Amino acid sequence: METALFFICIILVASILQTSTGFGFSIMATPFLLMIFLPKEAIQINLILSLVISLSLIWKIKADIEFTLLKRFIVGSIVGVPFGILIFISINMNAFKMGVSILLLMLTLLLICNFKVKPSQSKDFIVGGISGLLTTSIGMPGPPLLLYFTGVGTEKEKLRATTLAFYLFIYLISLITQIIITGTSKTILESSLYAIPIVFIGLFIGQIVFKWINQRIFRLFTYILLSCTGFYLLLESLNFL
């Protein structure tokens, strides 16, 4: 009963964050789902529910999508996805998480210190590639996109819409790749099905929250989520969690 309640809380809070910011679900949900499920289960549940969220929201916000940037992210991610699978099935995951966490914390500190990034086509492709790699390896495509968008000072509407549109592609490709390479299970399918009603409650609340979040609060949320994700991955890689 306690595990089920914990699962419901994770999905509800993560869905609200995803809807109101465009990037909160995988960053919030994956670390906590790993406390309940095996890595493959946690990642696939995250992919399925994130795909449901993106499908539900995309038609409402399509006018804010920056399609040129979206195409570059998609092309880059196609290269990153297979490398993520290789990491998932072969590399020491603790060492990989430690590297990601340290890099994430360093970059977040730079953003807090008002470090700016000059956008370019090559950087767009690289960010998409890293995001694709992280999606299939640890189920977290959000951090590289979030860091990049924040560094270039993207408006919150454009950030949310473009990110969700990219998720629609990368989550579908990553889920198919995961299932083909590692298979799926009854636990994954049942847990995802039970969580969908909670996701829609979170979508409703998140839409309300988005209307009153200004750019300053949005940026603060960004720093908090990135820092928490970085510290969590670091502690988990050191076996403190």
Image: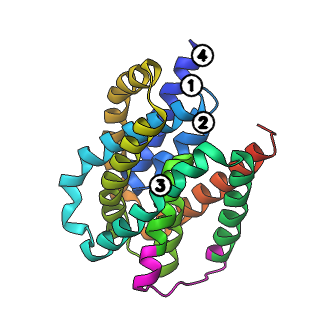
Binning the other alpha carbons within 10 Å of mark 1 as few (below 14), some (14 to 19) or many (20 upward) gives some
From the top left corner, tell me how far across and down residue 10 is, in percent. Answer: 52, 33
Which x, y percent locates residue 4? 52, 18
* Residue occupying image coordinates x 69% and y 52%: 97
Task: Identify the residue shown where x is 45% and y is 56%.
Answer: 81
Residue with the mark numbered 3: 82
- Give the extent of the magenta segment: 111-125
Amino acid carrying mark 2 in the image = Phe
- In primary-sequence order, the first of circles 1 and 3 is 1
Label 4 element class = helix
Checking the image for residue 6, the label placed there is: 1
State if disc 2 and disc 1 touch (CB < 8 Å): yes
Q: Amino acid at mark 4?
A: Glu
Q: Which residue is mark 4?
A: 2
Cβ atoms under marks 1 and 4 closer than 8 Å: yes
Q: Give amino acid for label 3.
A: Pro
In the image, residue 103 above or below residue 54: below
Q: Residues within 10 Å of mark 4 (few under 14, many from 20)?
A: few
Magenta stretch containing residue 203, yes or no? no
Distance from disc 3 to disc 4, alpha carbons, whole Å, reads: 37 Å
Element type at marker 2? Answer: helix
- Tell me the residue at 69%/58% (across/down): 101
Q: Which residue is mark 2?
A: 32
Tell whether 6 sits left or right of 162: right
What's the CA distance linking mark 2 and mark 3?
Answer: 25 Å
Question: What's the residue type where badge 1 is placed?
Answer: Phe
- Mark nearer the viewer, 1 or 2: 2
